[in-house]
Amino acid sequence: MELKSVTDPQYQILLDEKKDFRRKTYKKIGLTIIYIFLVLWAVFTFVPLLWMLSSSFKDSSAITAVPPELLPKKPTLDAYKRIFEVGGMARWFLNSTIVASISTIINVFFASLAGYAFSKLKFPGRNTIFWVLLSSMMIPGQVTLIPLYILVVNTLQLENTYFGLIVPGMVSVGSIFLMKQFMSSLPSSLIDAGRIDACSEFGIFRKIILPMAKPGLAVLGIFTFVGHWNNFFWPFLITNTNSMRTLQVGLTSFRFENLQDYGAMMAGAVCSAVPMIIVFLALQKYFLRGITIGAVKG
Amino acid sequence: MAEVKFVNVIKEFEDEKKGKVRAVNNANFVVKDKEFLVFVGPSGCGKTTSLRMIAGLERQSSGDIFIGNRLVNKVHPKDRDIAMVFQDYALYPHMTIKENLAFGLKNLKTPKAEIEAKIKEAAAILSIENLLDRKPRELSGGQKQRIAVGRAIVRNPSVFLFDEPLSNLDAKLRVQMRVELSELHKRLGATVIYVTHDQVEAMTLGQRIVVMNGGEIQQIASPEELYENPNNMFVAGFIGSPPMNFIKARLDGNQLMTADYTLTVPVGLLDKYKAYQKEEVVLGIRPEDIISLNLLNHQPNHNVIEPTLKVVEHLGAELLFYFNIGEDQVTGRVGADAKLKSLSKVKLYINMEKMHLFDPNTQERI
Amino acid sequence: MAATVSETSKKWSWVNFKQFMKDYGWCYAFIALPFLLFLVFTVYPLITAFIMSFQEYGILESKFIGFENYKYLLENEIFWKSMKNTVIYTVGTVPVNILITFFLALMIFPINKRSQTFFKASFYLPAVTSGITMSLIWLWMFDPTESGLMNIVLGWFGFDQQMWLASSDSALFSIMLMTYIGGHGSGVILYLAAMGGIPKSLYEAADIDAASWWSKLKNITWPLLKPTTLYMLITGVIGSFQVFEATYVMTQGGPNFATTTIAYLIYQHAFQYYQFGLASAEAFILGFVIIIISVLQFKYMSSDVEY
Ligand SMILES: Nc1ncnc2c1ncn2[C@@H]1O[C@H](COP(=O)(O)OP(=O)(O)OP(=O)(O)O)[C@@H](O)[C@H]1O
Ligand SMILES: [Mg+2]
């Protein structure tokens, strides 16, 4: 566009101001639409969780009532009673807590140790070993599943034990990768300073690296905990007594044993989801930060 | 007693893309006890690598390193009786300054009372007593710098290693710290090995200077010697600012033929250049040895040239001026009272007493 | 000149070995446990599974049957059906969800930091609930009677009730539908991070060149986000090829194999019929397909975007 010569400068100023005003108005309208849409979408994604919550407080008749009740008219804890007494929620909850906590502690410690070695130490074969580990992430779990199952259940006799639940997933390659990414952003000169300050190699890791890597450890810890809490397939394969089931496995078996008891299922779902939601709300910033550390670019 | 000695030291790195990279090639030198020795050279020339080999943070590929007559090839950094100050200070961010200073001593199982005493002493030397309870992030760059030095001092080593310790400071602070470091060296009476890429820092601090380029040691000498008698064109060009001018020429008798002018070689020097009669050579002359005729109180009858100046820059007390001889650009430096003007023709006297000749093939000084 | 790098020290000797361990031993110690676990729980099973896939596996005795397992599968109707289901599921979910994610990120990007954080958190929140939990909730929402939430909602708009998971026509679609709602949080965060990394000057230059909103989107934003898109595409495809929990909890692969995915079929063969050999062969086919697709995507999608 070329600037036309204007006969009346006063008129041109008016015209420009009008245009500017219009642009600003458009922008405001646009932003308002965006906000409305985003809020609607957020509500939309919460619907399943809200429905879960509402259903869990209904009694058996309210849950199939016609016309349906969106909110329970007479909220009760009956469904929770059933999932605890008929199902065994307390035990499942305990099992999940134990498995997720121990796995997390072991995973965070060893993954950060290995991540440190892979990012900051130099030794023959380092890159080769790392790439071999990393490329194993491409292999779908189903491939190794059967021999793994035979190994753990038949050879090692670890069916229905905490060992069997924890050991195969003790240190994940994904965690090592996350830690390697995180550690490589720490300055190497501190490690050298540690060596000159007569610190042992493990001492450097424990006294210098770990304290500095705290935010990364928190991210990894949270993700690992949530991951193990939500993990289904392996615990499902290797537990078959109700007392050893984890929460996810217990809920699933309950669903098949009590086909129509949606109320209790929703109560169970609440027990599974709410602790994680609380963890998330409390430690939000670590979650949001962690997602970007983990992703490989390209 | 802490000499540091390199014997045929080579360091090669495995680089993923370039294959083997030789960072230090066949280094031989001796750092005398209590000497302040500076390594200087352009980026990537292997200064840091040399320093890290002395520290034991990097193992040489071949050759021997001695510290105070002890062969330290396989000795851990903590047992080498050295301390190091890093470019980025490398203060432990989660420890207080006091803990930072004490960390090494604690690891060496030094008694508590002794640690306290040493920290107190170092803090007094560096006047950092009021900072001891802070964390590194609460300090300014200059303060961090002091703490980093302090951490080295408390170890009471016989060799101090510095890797570009001043490069993260602003210009003013750098000058101040330079003076302090110099005083500190006298006071501590230890050997200091100091790496920098700043030749001014090298010239002002070093008792002797090691000039490196591309992994090779070019010259080891005192600052004056380096300036007056550079071994080769690299050293001549690296030391001094603006650098020495290099002008292609041909030697014929006592005549030095450049593209535009014929200059006369002083009789006393002719003997040295015998082997290069009728050969191509490179004339090296420092900017301050190109003098505006209007500043001289005598009128020389030879070695006067009359070029047209391309540009004259005013630096306050001094003028820098640029002109060409053949294809070579020449820089001169004179006092501001010469009152030179750009694009003017001026008479310049070249002080050939200060000339150097270089072999254009080997780049060595003749 | 000096001998090149440690000719002598390359030779094996007890002294050299001791020195090597002194220099590097602790490095290997640091990675020892993960590496050991990797050998025992990944490498060993991988090799065993490969052998198994050529066997008719029995607890006491296994016999080699060559490519029989693979041949059986490639001629098996249900295997192909499950393959088809998996592909439909992948094609119907991954690109759609990437688009949803992209537009959500696009909308969040211009708003202020605090609202951004709020929406990031809101969209991420459903992702901390487990697949099992979500599947149970949706199972209940898809209830084919009039008390299922989905049917309630349809009723509000005057539509007929649907069978959802209970009909082989709509079961797979229902499972896909479930992925469209929620679960975009992490993708949105990745996109936002990448969008923040695009230099502002590019947009300013475009503004001066009088580019429209759409043209900036098409010519700057989308192409420069390609690495992120590629990352989400590859991880998305790998994930959706292994979809299991939803079909297991909600439909058990039915009705009439309408939701039998490969992962589900592998599970059935392995842990309901104990045909370990067959299941291993199936798993290898799945692994092969996943790797091929990832490589292809990488090759055709990745271009050298540098900024
Ligand atoms: N860990 C390493 N791996 C591979 N190559 C390296 C490594 N460290 C240094 N190099 C290479 O060795 C050469 C010398 O590096 P060095 O760090 O000693 O240079 P420098 O003189 O200290 O430079 P600067 O002034 O930039 O600090 C460079 O070419 C560098 O790329
Ligand atoms: Mg350096």
Image (tube, coloured by chain):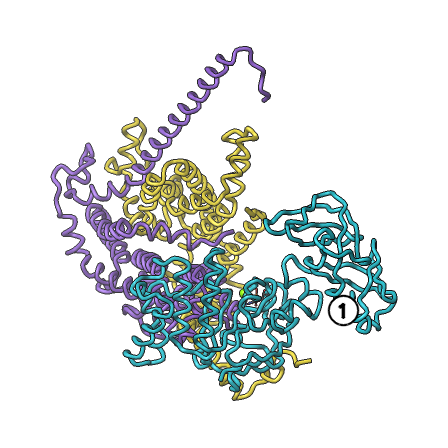
Chain colours: A purple, B cyan, C yellow
* Residue toward you, C164 or B295: B295
Q: Amino acid at mark 1?
A: Thr
Q: Quadrant of residue A178?
A: bottom left
Secondary structure beneath dot 1 equals loop
Note whether C117 is above or below B252 in the view shown.
above
Q: x, y percentage for residue B271?
A: 82, 73
Query: Which quadrant is home to the C terminus of chain B?
Result: bottom right
Note whether A157 is above or below C115 in the view shown.
below
* Residue toward you, C304 or A82: C304
Decide if ligand 1 comes within 8 Å of the CB at mark 1.
Answer: no
Q: Residues within 10 Å of mark 1 (few under 14, many from 20)?
A: few
Say left or right for C63 vs B303: left
Q: x, y percentage for residue C77?
A: 48, 51
Say left or right for B333 vs A195: right
Q: x, y percentage for residue B107?
A: 35, 77
* Residue toward you, A280 or C24: C24
Q: How many marks overall?
A: 1
* Residue at which label 1 appears: B362
Residue at (40%, 46%) from the top-left corner?
Answer: C189
Disc 1 is attached to a residue of which chain? B
Can you see residue C41? no
Residue at (67%, 46%) from the top-left corner?
Answer: B339
As drawn, which residue projects farthest toward the front?
B297
Q: x, y percentage for residue B211?
A: 62, 69
* Residue toward you, B195 or B21: B195
Residue at (31%, 46%) from the top-left corner?
Answer: C125
Residue at (68%, 58%) from the top-left corner?
Answer: B288
Say left or right for A208 vs C86: left
Where's ligand 2: which quadrant?
bottom right
Note whether C137 is above or below C209 in the view shown.
below
